Every structure is written in structure tokens, then in C-alpha cells.
Image (cartoon, rainbow, N blue to C red):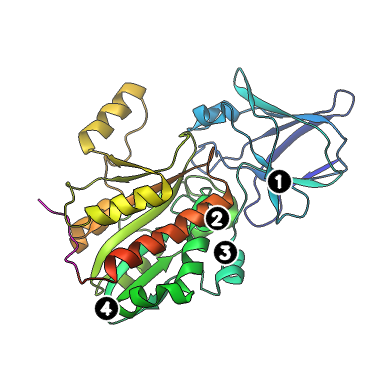
Amino acid sequence: MNVFSDFESGAINFGNWDSKNKILRVSLTKNLKGEVNHWFYFGVKGAPKRMTIFFDNGMQSRFSKGWYNYKPFTSVDNRIWERCDTAFNVQGGSISIDLNDLPQDFYFAWYPPYVPKLFNEHTGFSDYINQIGNKKGKSILITARHHPGESMGSFFLDGLCAFLKSSDSGNLLSKYNIIVVPFVNIAGVNDGMHRTSYDGADYNFAWFRQDVDKINQIKGFIEDKPVVLYFDIHGDEVSKFNYLYYTGKKLRSIEPLLLDLQMRNKIALLHRSKYKYILKVLLKKHKLVSGIKNTVEYVEQNKGCAGFVYELSAHSADPEECRIQGKNLGLALDKYLSSMQPSISVST
């Protein structure tokens, strides 16, 4: 049997194959700082009908709670993905899964991969920075894949961009410039990283730094743009539901948009305060990552606009659901923004 991951976004370390007991042992990859990735994606050739896969360092992932009852994905052709009918088992420091009725050749992934060339193929847009609509109008910034392994963000943008290319978006695009950055940490996506780039940089907390070239390019691009609204699309490894949270002050003028989006996508609206975040980190003894100084806070501070983090659950939001959520963001924006010229800001 052959286990391989030498392709775009592929990631796994082969351990050994016990042909007698049909047990495959592998381990999750690490970045240069030694952090264990949650993301895995690899192919198998010559598989038996049934086998058990052990991830020997699975519980070393920062998001180890996300393994409980999680059903990963398999594919025969590396394009159409289906969830497994069984979930992970936690055994000490390892996680394992029993696979049945396997084809001889298949692919296995934490979540269906979405690589840059697929985005161009599906949407016709660039994998770098795209401007859609009235370039002289106010701008709405939308980004994804700050964390490379959160591929649900790309499926979300797939649905959003399909809406933006349709005739239904005409009113919105006649007034607003939609800036879409689909792969912020594109190097991490290509290298099969999960949370960081290969050298260990978390791009979601790099906007207040000056040493990350890709972030500097995006900051330079929007420097002279009148950005009035920002959505950063992510995936959540542990939560069982989708949610939208903001880190700024309470919002008033944009409340109708949020309530419409909540109704369309059945998402929770959460306020994530700096103090609650620090308390959570201290209680769980996690590493404090620059407080709450993430991408959204940078854009809010420098553009004076409202910013949101949109989190899609790996457990409950399959790719098609992510596409629907993305389309619904476009519909909600069109309904709210095309009917008026609002002053969108973080109110005090």
C-alpha cells in the first residue's frame, strides 16, 4: 500500500503499515516552530476494504477537542468529497478512525481541500486581490484563508463570488467596490499548513507587524481605499455551529444587515471582548496571541469601519452549506446597501 501527500496542500507523515491487522499509523505535520497541524490531506493507493488509521500525535493539535465526534472526508477523484460514516476515536494521545468499504485508491482529508487554481477555475477571479463593482465607490473588504487549513472560507467565497457575477448583484455593484482577497496565506495553503505559514507565522495576528510581505501588500492596496465594511472568513475546528463575531464597539447603524444575515444563515451573533478573551486564555492556559490584535481590529482602527469574523463550523458546515452562506452574505449586502448610501461605522 502506498501513502502519499506530495501535492498542493497535501500534508501527512507516514509511520508504518501493519498489513496483518490492517492498521495504518501516520502523524500530523508540524511547522518550523514545532506546532502540530490540525490539517491533514493525503492519498492512499492499494488500500484494503477495511482498515484503521491512527494519527499518533493527533491530541497534540491545538484544537484537539475538535476531534471528538468529528467525521472527516474521503474522495475517489480528489474533487467530489463525502463525509465518513464513522467519527474519530480518542485513545490517549492518538486519534483513530475505522474505515469500511474502501476503494483501492482514495484521498483522505480533515476537510475538503480548496486550492488557489480551483478558485480561478470556479470563479474566474484571481487568487490574489480582486475588485468587483464600482471602483470609484466605497469599498467592502472580504478576506479568507488567513489560516490556510480553514478551507471552508474558500467554499464560502465561491458562493459569494457566484452571486457577485450574477445579474442579481447589479444594484450592489453599481454603488460599491467589493475587494475580495481569497488566499491571504497562500504559501501556507500550498504547503499544507493549518494555522500558520511553514515558518510559524499566524497571519491573522500579523497586521500590526511590518515583516510579513503578503500582509503588507494587502495593507498597501487598501491604504487609499474608503473601506466601510469588513468580513474576514474563517473555519472553526471545535464549534458545532456557525457564528459571526465582532471585536469592536457595539454597532447601531449596521444592525439591520446583521439581523438579516442572521435570519438567512441561522448564525449566532457574538461580541468577543478583549477582556473575555484574555480571561479565557488564562483559564485554559493557552498562549496569549497578541491579545485581541487580529486582522479585524487593524482594519477597524485604520479605516474606522465595522469589522467581523465569520466562523464556519467544520463539524456542521459542509462545502455546499458554506457556498450557500457566502451567497446569502451577498444577498444581505445587496438588500441593505443598494437601497441607501449609509454611513457604516463603529458607533460609540
Comes first in the chain, label 1 or label 3: 1
Name which quarter of the figure residue 118 lies in.
bottom right
What is the distance, in whole Å, between disc 3 and disc 4 at their CAs? 28 Å
What is the distance, in whole Å, between disc 4 and disc 1 at their CAs? 44 Å
Name which quarter of the figure residue 214 lies in.
bottom left
Residue 238 lies, in percent from the top left, at 48, 33
Mark 2 or 4: in front is 4
Could you tell me if the residues under marks 3 and 2 are in contact, i.e. CB atoms within 8 Å? yes
What is the distance, in whole Å, between disc 1 and disc 3 at their CAs? 18 Å
The residue that disc 1 covers is 42
Q: Dot 2 lies on which element?
A: helix
10 Å crowding of disc 1: few (<14), some (14-19), many (20+): many
Comes first in the chain, label 3 or label 4: 3
**Which quadrant of the figure contains the N terminus?**
top right
Q: Amino acid at mark 4?
A: Gly
Residue 185 lies, in percent from the top left, at 47, 57
Residue 164 lies, in percent from the top left, at 45, 71
The residue that disc 2 covers is 189
The residue that disc 4 covers is 137
Q: Dot 4 lies on which element?
A: loop
What is the distance, in whole Å, between disc 1 and disc 2 at their CAs? 14 Å
Tag of residue 116: 3
The answer to whether one can see residue 282 in this image is yes
Could you tell me if the residues under marks 2 and 4 are in contact, i.e. CB atoms within 8 Å? no
Comes first in the chain, label 4 or label 1: 1
Would you say 151 lies left or right of 9 here?
left
